[in-house]
C-alpha cells in the first residue's frame, strides 16, 4: 500500500509555528501541493508539547485523505486516545455511504498515554449564527474563543482577517473571554485531486472541516489545559445531509486522557438559533454583530446581498430586530433583492431547508421589524408565508447539473489563471 511518512515535526517563529515534514510515495503525491507542507501557527510557544500531541493537527487533516484514497500514514508516535478515536471516526465515515471503501490506515511506532488535567473549556468561534448560538448556551462557562485563519478566510486575505480579529477583540460581549488565533494552511496543502475522491465535490464541508478544526486546537489544549472543546452545529437532526461535522463524528474525537468534544446545537434548527440570539439580545440589552458572510465581493462587515446574509437578515426581521444593529446594511428594498439573488446559481436541499424554516417562522409571527411601510412590507412577508421562495428553490433543485459543475471545477483548478482573471473582473 502506498504511504505518506511523517519524517519530522519542527518549530519556528519562537516555537509558535509547527511545520510537518512529510514525504508521499509517487502514486500519492498527486494529492499534495509540492513544496507546501502543512503548518499550524499559534500565538504562544508550543514547542515543549509532546510529539504525540503535536502530531494531531497533521493527522486530523491527512487521515481523511488517506481513508478515501486508500494509503497508509506512518508516524513515530501519537496520543493513544486520539489513535483509537480516529479508528472509530473512520468507521463513522464508512457508515455514511457504502459505495465508498475506506482502506487507508494509520501506523504509529508508539502510542503515548497523555493526561491533560484541565478545567477550562474552549470553543471554535467564527462569529456567525451557529457560533453565537453555542456561545450563548455556554456563556457562563467563559470559554476561550478559538478562531482559525485559513478556514473560512484565506491566508492571503489579510484585510478580511485583520478586520475579523479586530471585531472579535473589540466586541464588548466577548470581553470576558480569552481569545486564541490560529493560522494554518489546512485548505491549501492539498490539490484539487482530493476533491475528486468524492462523487460530488465539497471535500471541506462534507469531510474535512470537523476533525481538522478540532484537531488544530490540540497543541494549545496541552498548554492551556482545556477539558472540553465546543464546535457549533451547522445543520440539525431534522435534515439528513452529508457533513464533516456531526455529533457522531465530533463526539468521538479525543486526546490527552479524556478531552471531550461537544457538537453543540444539533437539536436546533437554524431559525431556532436566530431566535435564541434575538432573545438573548433582548434579555441582556446587547447589540452585537453577526459575522455570517465571507463573500469575495464583500466590502463591509457582511455583504448584505448574498443568500446566507439574506436568510439571517430575514430571521432577525421575523424576531422584530433591526438587521442594521447586527452587522448588516439594508432597508425595505431587501425583499425584492431576495428573489433577484436566489434566481442565480444552484441550490441544495440544505439551503432549501433553511428557507423552509423561515417560511414556517413567518407563518407563526404576527409582528416583524418594519423598515418604513408596514402595509407594503406585510405584503412581502405574506409572499414568504405562502412559500414563494421555497417554490423558486425547488425548481433549481429539480434541475441539477452536477456533471457540469464537476467539469467546471476541474477546469478551474487545472487552469488557476482563469480563477484569478474572474476575481479580477468581478472586483
Image (cartoon, rainbow, N blue to C red):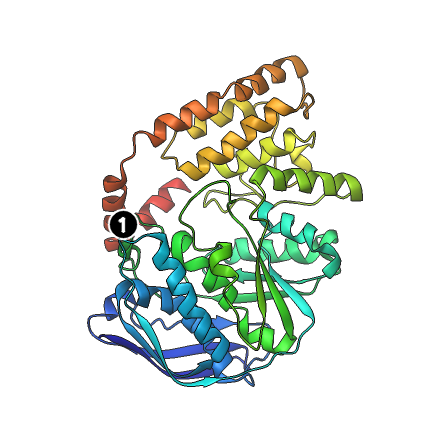
**Position of 55 compared to 198: left or right?**
right
Q: Quadrant of residue 290?
A: top right
Residue drawn at the location 23% of the way across and 49% of the way down:
411
Q: How many marks?
A: 1
Nearest to the observer: residue 323 or residue 195 = 195
Nearest to the observer: residue 367 or residue 186 = 367
Q: Is residue 150 above or below residue 55?
A: above
Q: Residues within 10 Å of mark 1 (few under 14, many from 20)?
A: few
Q: Position of residue 29 (x, y in %)?
A: 25, 70
**Position of 407 compared to 174: left or right?**
left
Q: Position of residue 180 (x, y in %)?
A: 62, 66
**Position of 188 compared to 362: left or right?**
left
Residue at the disc numbered 1 = 199
Q: Is residue 341 above or below residue 270?
A: above
Nearest to the observer: residue 303 or residue 236 = 236
Q: Is residue 12 in view?
A: no
Q: Quadrant of residue 367?
A: top right
Residue drawn at the location 58% of the way across and 14% of the way down:
379
Q: Quadrant of the C terminus?
A: top left
Q: Is residue 120 above or below residue 198?
A: below
Q: Quadrant of residue 228?
A: bottom right
SS assignment at label 1: loop
Q: Position of residue 98 (x, y in %)?
A: 29, 54
Q: Is residue 272 above or below residue 12?
A: above
Residue drawn at the location 59% of the way across and 77% of the way down:
222
Nearest to the observer: residue 27 or residue 198 = 198
Q: Position of residue 78 (x, y in %)?
A: 45, 80
Q: Is residue 390 in view?
A: yes
Q: Quadrant of the N terminus?
A: bottom left
Amino acid at each position: 500500500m502506498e504511504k505518506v511518512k511523517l519524517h519530522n515535526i519542527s518549530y519556528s517563529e519562537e516555537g509558535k509555528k509547527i511545520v510537518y515534514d512529510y514525504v508521499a510515495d509517487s502514486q500519492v503525491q498527486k494529492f499534495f501541493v509540492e513544496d507546501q507542507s502543512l503548518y499550524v501557527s499559534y500565538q504562544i510557544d508550543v514547542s515543549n508539547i509532546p510529539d504525540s500531541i503535536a502530531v494531531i493537527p497533521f493527522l486530523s487533516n491527512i487521515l481523511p485523505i488517506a481513508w478515501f484514497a486508500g494509503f497508509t500514514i506512518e508516524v513515530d508516535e501519537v496520543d493513544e486516545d486520539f489513535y483509537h478515536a480516529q479508528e472509530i471516526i473512520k468507521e463513522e465515515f464508512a457508515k455514511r455511504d457504502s459505495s465508498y471503501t475506506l482502506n487507508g490506515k494509520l501506523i504509529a511506532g508508539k502510542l503515548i498515554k497523555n493526561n491533560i488535567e484541565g478545567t477550562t473549556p474552549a470553543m471554535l468561534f467564527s462569529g456567525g449564527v451557529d457560533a453565537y448560538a453555542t456561545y450563548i448556551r455556554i456563556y457562563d462557562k467563559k470559554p476561550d474563543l478559538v478562531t482559525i485563519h485559513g478556514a473560512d478566510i484565506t491566508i492571503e486575505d489579510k484585510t478580511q482577517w485583520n478586520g475579523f480579529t479586530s471585531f472579535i477583540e473589540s466586541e464588548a460581549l466577548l470581553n470576558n473571554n480569552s481569545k486564541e488565533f490560529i493560522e494554518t494552511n489546512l485548505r491549501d496543502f492539498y490539490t484539487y485531486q482530493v476533491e475528486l475522491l468524492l462523487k460530488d465535490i465539497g471535500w471541506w464541508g462534507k469531510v474535512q472541516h470537523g476533525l481538522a478544526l478540532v484537531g488544530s486546537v490540540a497543541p494549545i489544549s496541552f498548554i492551556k489545559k482545556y477539558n472540553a472543546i465546543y464546535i457549533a452545529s451547522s445543520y440539525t437532526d431534522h435534515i439528513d445531509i452529508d457533513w464533516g461535522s456531526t455529533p457522531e463524528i465530533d463526539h468521538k474525537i479525543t486526546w490527552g486522557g479524556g478531552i471531550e468534544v461537544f457538537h453543540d446545537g444539533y437539536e436546533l434548527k437554524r431559525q431556532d438559533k436566530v431566535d435564541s440570539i434575538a432573545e438573548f439580545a433582548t434579555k441582556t440589552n446587547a447589540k452585537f454583530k453577526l459575522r455570517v458572510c465571507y463573500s469575495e465581493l464583500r466590502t463591509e462587515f457582511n455583504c448584505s446581498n448574498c443568500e446566507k446574509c439574506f436568510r439571517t437578515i430575514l430571521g432577525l426581521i421575523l424576531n422584530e430586530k433591526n438587521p442594521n444593529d447586527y452587522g448588516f446594511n439594508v432597508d425595505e428594498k431587501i425583499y425584492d433583492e431576495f428573489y433577484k439573488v436566489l434566481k442565480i446559481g444552484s441550490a441544495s436541499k440544505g439551503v432549501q431547508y433553511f428557507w423552509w424554516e423561515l417560511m414556517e417562522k413567518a407563518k407563526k409571527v404576527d409582528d416583524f421589524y418594519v423598515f418604513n411601510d408596514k402595509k407594503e412590507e406585510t405584503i412581502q412577508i405574506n409572499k414568504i408565508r405562502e412559500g414563494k421562495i421555497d417554490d423558486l428553490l425547488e425548481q433549481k433543485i429539480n434541475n441539477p447539473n452536477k456533471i457540469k459543475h464537476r467539469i467546471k471545477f476541474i477546469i478551474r483548478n487545472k487552469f488557476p489563471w482563469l480563477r484569478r482573471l474572474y476575481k479580477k473582473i468581478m472586483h
